[in-house]
Image: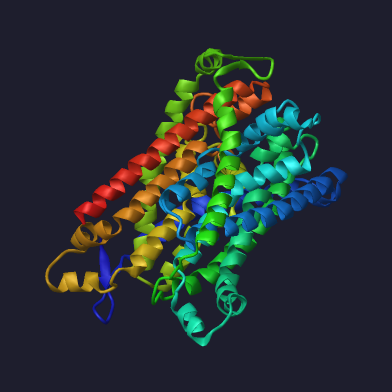
Amino acid sequence: MTGTRTAAGKWVPSTALKILLCIFWLFAIILPLIRMLSTMATVNVANIITSARFLRALGHSLAVTAVATIISVGIAGLLAWCVSRTNLKHKAFLNTILTIPMLIPSISHGMGLIIVLGANGWISRIIGLNSGIYGFWGIVIGSVMYSFPVAYLMIYDVLHYEDGTPYEAANVMGLSVKDKFFAIALPYLRKPLISVIFATFTMVITDYGVPLMVGGKYITLPVMMYQDVIGMLDFGKGSVIGMILLIPAVIACIIDMANRDKGNANFVGKPYYVKINKVRDHIARAICIIMIILILLPIGSFAVLGFIKKYPIDMTLSVQNIEQAVHMGALKYLGNSLLIAVVVAVLGTALALFNAYMTARNKTKLSYVLHLMSITSLAIPGLVLGLSYVMFFKKSPIYGTFAILFLVNSMHFFASPYLMAYNTFGKINENLEDVGSTIGISKWGIIKDVILPQSSGTILEMMGYFFVNSMMTISAVSFLASVSDKPLALMITQFEGQMQLECAAFVSLIILAVNILLKVILYAAKRGFSKIN
């Protein structure tokens, strides 16, 4: 890399490189979004947002999202407390099991819910629920299953790294559990919880997979957007709905940015000490077991569904659904998904690392602009990003090719891996490059031999994040994929539309198996790196 020196002699990456990155982000995120929003000029926005169908869908979205967010954050907080504030064994295993729902598309959760609690669900028949759990409560339950693992990880991370020193002082002062909660825990958790609530709210309100499967006639905004764009090619109305869906995501992004720096500045003087309390541990263990059963019920149900003839008419074991899925191109589309996931994991991680180095290791005014552009995708739902790409890149050479799928997935999932690298690079001694330059070590040598090895765990996490999400995403690619480059996850919506839930279940199971295998590989790689270091 080329660079210039400041008056103090500190090396700064070339301004030209940062400008090039800013131009890249302009074309990858900003201009497509502007192009989509400009389409609203071709429609009567007032008529759309005041129509009975839109207002009904908006009311449905807000209602299910509010209830699902409250339940999801509540469950996540309880489970995070059970794992972080008790002496339960095998916490790493618990974290893995509790986050399994993150490894399959949201539409698969809706499908699992249909098998368990649908009109012909096996639990529905046991308890006599003839109509099934479609509509409001179906969407709420499915959304909770889909969103609570993310909220759990966020809250667990906050509790896991909480400084135990104030609690020791409170014990010396003789404060009660209630007083410690209101004086220490609540102030500490307040700002992170705001970020968790808005992040969960955004996940639920912008998801269309669960409402598409179990919503029935209870239409939400993302489903309305999907139907109008895919079914009627009404891009103007889709843009209006996309703009509405941007609002909660932008608010969540702003709140996350406002809280992030303060949260990262916390210094952990001493880990939180968990006292011995067998009763508390038994209660926590029971809560975790119950939640694990609830998680595995729908996942296990659609796993079984893929190997029977026709649910619930013919429950005999069969491979005909597997054969049908393969006949319709499942293996080809699996290859497409693996190609997309691998390329996005490699290129996305490389871009995120380069971007993070430019912003975290060399702070200038232009670096701050680049940082803001790099986290813009946090505020753009997948459906909105996919629609903006259709409008902006439609006549470009990459439209209809794998290249646009590589790009949209990299941009859709970029912000979180970038922030991982940004935070990691920011914690490494900021004078390394200067010291290396003084003793004759090149900047690339410092990066290759010091910075990247110290960040190996973060890099593996980044690659895993890109891979897993690229394997299971539907929203960002649903408007862009063609027959030749279609990812495997889109076969779920195809089979669902044809009422072939058994084939859709088999496809979901493939995605889950691939993502679990990747997690195992990453775990082994991390252990290998830790032994080397």
131 versus 527 height, above or below: above
Side of 46 relative to 96 (left or right): right
Foreground residue, 418 or 407? 418
**Percent of width and height locating residue 520:** 36, 40
Compared to residue 352, the image places residue 217 above or below, namely above
Q: Residue furthest bottom?
A: 173
Residue occupying the point 47% across, 70% down = 162
Q: Residue 166, can we see it?
A: yes
Seen from the viewer's position, the closer of residues 159 and 85 is 85
Determine the residue positioned at 41% across, 51% down.
Answer: 90
Which of the 4 image quarters holds residue 23? bottom left
Image quadrant in which you'd find residue 362: bottom left
Q: Position of residue 371 (x, y in %)?
A: 45, 64
Q: How many marks?
A: 0
Vertical position of residue 256 compared to residue 387: above or below: below
Outermost residue toward the left in this view: 439
**Residue at 59% across, 58% down:** 78
Between 418 and 274, the residue placed more toward the observer is 274
Apparent side of residue 207 relative to residue 520 in the rendered image (left or right): right
Examine the rendering and report whether any part of residue 238 can be seen: no
Whole-percent x, y for residue 6 in the image: 28, 77
Tell me the quarter of the image containing the N terminus. Answer: bottom left
The quadrant of the picture occupied by the C terminus is bottom left
Q: Residue furthest front?
A: 278
338 with respect to 6 (left or right): right
Q: Position of residue 110 (x, y in %)?
A: 65, 36
**Residue located at (59% from left, 36% from top):** 297
